[in-house]
Amino acid sequence: MRAFSKKTKMAALPVSVEVASWITFAAAFVVTLIFSTWYILGYRYKRHSECSSTFTAILALSVSFLTVLIGPIDVFLVSFMKNDDGEFKDWAESNVTRHHIQETVLYCYYALYGCLTLFVFLIIPFVYFYYEEQDENTNIKSRMCGALKYTACFIFVAVVLLVIGAFVPLKKPPTTNSTSFENDLAFLANELRDTRGETALYFTVGFLTLIGFICLVFYTGFGMVTFPADLIKGRKSTAVELDDVRSATERSRQRRRAIRRKYKDKDDRLSTRDRSRIDSLQDQEELLKRKERHLEDLQHRCCSKCSFLWRPFEIIFGVVGCLMALLIFTSLLLTSLDRALHSLGLKTGYILPERHLPNPIDMLLLFSQQVFPLDYIIFAAIILYLFLASIAGIERIGIWFCCVKMYKIRATHTKPQALLFLCMILIFTVLAINTMMYTLAPEYMSYGNQKYIAINNSTEQCTTYEPEDCVMTIAASLLTTSVFMLWYFGAVYYWANWAFLAMVLIGLLVALFKKRRSAIEGEVDSDDTDDSDDELLHV
């Protein structure tokens, strides 16, 4: 970090490094774009879909993934600067070369986070209200004017956050009796203090990440265990559930007949209470009839008859998911305990200078980095699992705002407004995941597998306490410095990790005691219309 001040001739970056890093990142972009397209198209409601909302959702989801997947590229570039003996490679001996590489990565981070900010405060709100303004008597111009009117409120919030971030008081860097790590923080903190525009951006992203941790705790924490547990348990048998539905329908009819029998079938003499009970039973019977239709349709589908073929794979994926959840839970718990015991304290955002407790994910990523892109694949697998857990949590809990359930997320039946809300939540969640990865794999995210030559001429792994001859990743530099200066964000992130662990345990209890899912879960709901039922039956 401090080495950037030394000016020497810049050496050419090896072509193999550029190919291995940026080609991998380009491939990741293509994969995320394909995955986002497949996911959004699989969940959108075709009856009410609109190209603008679908395209915005796909693009927003792809960009949010890239903000996380650029992390391993950042790690690879700083790790590849050194040999196994701790010496810099010939092309990386120049401070200017190293600075140029990290500056390129820094601009990529700025571009991606800038795009996310635009999506949150401008693009998604505009497209959302543009769809809401749709009416038979409105044209495109009036819809755009109406959407801009409401979007202006989001722009105002963004401006307020930027202004607060530009003038918010920052924590002063240490001046005396400072360790090497604190000296590095002082250098970066002074740089941050001198660029108030960047500070405003950090504050805004930090605020969005704070919202993301709320989503991460409730949705991802709940879904991280219930998602693989549902795969292992499977769904109810279609035939058995169909018999149960028919039996429930018959019982409801008998109860309704029993009530009418008391009044000799004269509706005008029904009491208010019995009339309410009959109406409730009729609504229940209508819902049961719709379930019966869907179950009969599912029973005749080819996929239902062949479900026994992929049932073993569901169990395998469920077991792998449980192991992944255990790995994430253990790593997060150990690092959180380490930060509780050995961090620099509340006023530094609980920054951990040196790891004292083992971290399974950190060790796994450091070991796998010897064979690129194995660490990238493992890293992407962790992100994908957390994403799927988030989706599972959102499907179970639904989208809530101010204690009001606004939308439900269902395959092939999610409205455009719900898709845009979903993407907004996922953007916040991915920002929180990006920050939490620094807790899950602190050494990997900071220095990769870099080595340095110790005083006794032995080769040691780079740590935060020994940064003299090590190059910190841009992600770790930005996060550590911003958390140190805006320490209240770091403190909230730290306690949010504990809340996440608590929610995982709650999800575990739910997974242990909850029965198997319905064979048609998500297809039938009390507020669905007959037209929507007909559409689902033909999917």
Image (cartoon, grey):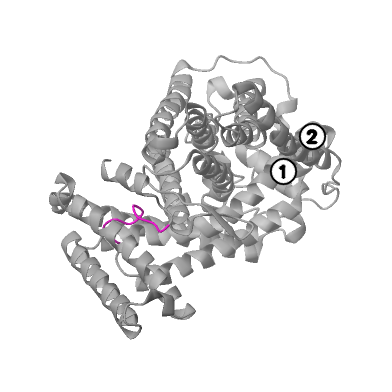
Q: Which quadrant: the C terminus?
A: top left
Q: Position of residue 339 (x, y in %)?
A: 62, 61
Snapshot quadrant of residue 534: top left
Circle 2 sits on which residue? 191
Range of residues picked out in magenta:
517-526
Which residue is painted at 53% across and 41% down in the image? Answer: 417
Image height check: is 35 above or below 440? above
Crowd rating for badge 1 (residues with CA inside 10 Å; few <14, some 14–19, many 20+): many
User: What is the three-letter code of the residue carrying label 2?
Assistant: Glu
The residue closer to the viewer here, 44 or 123, is 44
Image height check: is 517 above or below 123? below
Q: Is 176 left or right of 331, judged from the image as shown?
A: right
User: What is the three-letter code of the residue carrying label 1?
Assistant: Thr
The residue closer to the viewer here, 249 or 316, is 249
Residue 457: tell me if it is visible: no
In terms of secondary structure, where does tag 2 sit? helix
- Looking at the image, how many numbered discs can be counted on the residues? 2
The residue closer to the viewer here, 466 or 357, is 357
Q: Where is residue 497 in the image (x, y as percent from the top left)?
A: 58, 59
Which residue is painted at 18% across and 67% down in the image? Answer: 243
Q: Is 88 left or right of 314, judged from the image as shown?
A: right
By secondary structure, the bulk of the magenta-drawn segment is best described as loop
Marks 2/1 in contact by CB < 8 Å: the verdict is yes
Q: Where is residue 210 in the image (x, y as percent from the top left)?
A: 66, 51
Q: Which quadrant: the N terminus?
A: top right
Circle 1 sits on which residue? 481
- Magenta stretch contains residue 351: no
In terms of secondary structure, where does tag 1 sit? helix
Q: What's the CA distance linking mark 2 and mark 1?
A: 10 Å
